[in-house]
Amino acid sequence: MAKILIIEDEPAIRRVLTKILSEENSNYLVEEAEDGLAGTEKIKEEDFDLVLCDIKMPKMDGIEVLEAIKKIKPEIPVVMISGHGELDTAVNAMRLGAFDYISKPPDLNRLLNTVRNALDRKELVVENSRLKKKIGKNYEMVGNSPEISRIKEIIEKVAPTDARVLITGPNGTGKELVAHWLHQKSQRSSGPMVEVNCAAIPSELIESELFGHVKGAFTSANKDRAGKFEAANGGTIFLDEIGDMSLSAQAKVLRALQENKISRVGSDKDIKVDVRVIAATNKDLKKEIEDKKFREDLFHRLAVILIQVPALNDRREDIPVLVNFFNDKVTEEQGINKKEFTPQALELLKQYDWTGNIRELRNVVERLIILGGNQVTEDDVKLFASKQ
């Protein structure tokens, strides 16, 4: 049920708005406030999904109410109600964060459309916030080793800029964690983060996946389709395993970086894009350049900032912290009590050769939690973590 607050000093207009909204949708719960002061008090005490606010009111005008709402509960959309001669003020209110404005007397269709759109926007904002919290938890960077501390320092410096970043390191080391941290700490964090696994897409489809296509561009192209670069507009695109990208796709990516333009497969029309590019690879791109498998000019475009993610064997002091982190995560996912790992078990895990890096460690911890006793011992590690 959507909870809507009407802040309006004219009782007749309050009654009309309440009647319209209540009759339009039985899921609209409408409350009223006779002035801005009363309205802001209600907002402090209760949760609302939408506020309709008059501009000209005693005690506290609509602009002051809007500014207060943006400080108290910025996620609530505010629609301003403007009288004759208040259009400039209404437009200014939108610059200050109002969702929209409607004029008095309210046009029925305009009012209802604005309310629906504002409620849809509120739902998206809440969902995005929930997903960001979930993503933040899933992509937490764990460890206090000098190598990880250095990466965190680089991220803090680089994230607020639009500098392109190339992340290198073996498989399973957490290159995607670095990419997500860069996005979450950037000024683009409210925009999309679009991931593309270049190794998982057939070479003949990679261009269509990245740049989209027009109807008829190839046999199965039965309609126009936007690509990942367009989907990432205003945000970040993460090109994972870019070393596996075809040379023809590399040429198009290079153009997108140089000109901030892309063109869909089968079209000669340019589309402007505003995208930050972060790339990652487990390959030695300099060797790939020597073998004519990767463009040197693209490498230099991508590698403005280079971040090397170390193998787990090079940061063994982080293993106890990582085990504790995965212990929390796995037991929460499985709905079981957290297990205790003995010091001897942790010490033995530190001695293993982690060729699969963090990904392998996570799998081993899950196996030990499921198959081991309430206390995970050195014997459990020997039995269930053995690679033999």
Image (spheres, helix red, strand yellow):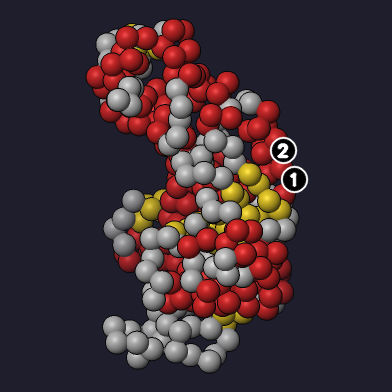
Residue 184's disc is none
Image: 107 above or below 42: below
Q: Is residue 259 visible?
A: yes
Identified by mark 1, the residue type is Lys
Residue 16 % position (x, y): 44, 66
Image: 264 above or below 196: below
Label 1 close to label 2 by CB (< 8 Å):
yes
Judging depth in this view, the residue of 101 and 171 nearest the camera is: 171
Residue 255 % position (x, y): 63, 78
Q: Is residue 278 visible?
A: no
Residue 346 % position (x, y): 45, 14
| Circle 1: element type | helix
Residue 50 % position (x, y): 48, 55
- The single residue placed furthest to the front in the displayed view is 291
Marks 1/2: CA–CA distance: 7 Å
| Circle 2: element type | helix
Judging depth in this view, the residue of 264 and 109 nearest the camera is: 264
Q: Which residue is mark 2?
A: 153
Query: Is 30 placed left or right of 82 in the picture?
Result: left
Q: Which residue is mark 1?
A: 157
User: Residue 147, located in which quarter of the rendered image?
Assistant: top right
- The single residue placed furthest to the left in the displayed view is 371
Q: How busy is the neighbourhood of tag 2: few (under 14 within 10 Å), some, or many (20 plus)? A: few
Residue depicted at 53% across the width and 29% down the height: 313
Residue depicted at 46% across the width and 27% down the height: 353
